[in-house]
Amino acid sequence: MDKSNRNHSIKCTVSSCKYHCDNADYCALSQIQVGTHEKNPTSVKCTDCESFEALG
């Protein structure tokens, strides 16, 4: 994965993610999956980036 290849359509500030671009607040993936951990989401806090992978 080339983390210098920013996807300007996906802004991201989660620097602990494997796909976060090191020098900018973007994702290096070509697409992401967004989901929810709640039955009836009602706010931003209820949504999740399901493409997240921790550094390591």
Image (cartoon, rainbow, N blue to C red):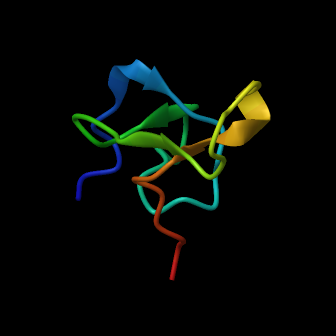
Q: Is residue 19 above or below residue 5?
A: below
Pick the residue in front: 25 or 43.
43
Residue placed furthest toward the bottom: 56
Q: Is residue 46 above or below residue 18?
A: above
Q: Is residue 45 above or below residue 11?
A: below
Drawn side of residue 42 relative to residue 35, left or right: right
**Residue 1 x/y as whole percent:** 23, 59
Pick the residue in front: 53 or 47.
47
Give the quarter of the image for residue 39.
top right
Give the quarter of the image for residue 28.
top left
**Residue 53 x/y as whole percent:** 46, 66
Pick the residue in front: 7 or 36.
36
Pick the residue in front: 42 or 33.
42
Give the quarter of the image for residue 36.
top right
**Residue 15 x/y as whole percent:** 64, 52
Residue at 58%, 45% in the rendered image = 48
**Residue 24 x/y as whole percent:** 55, 32
Residue at 77%, 36% in the rendered image = 45
Drawn side of residue 11 relative to residue 4, left or right: right
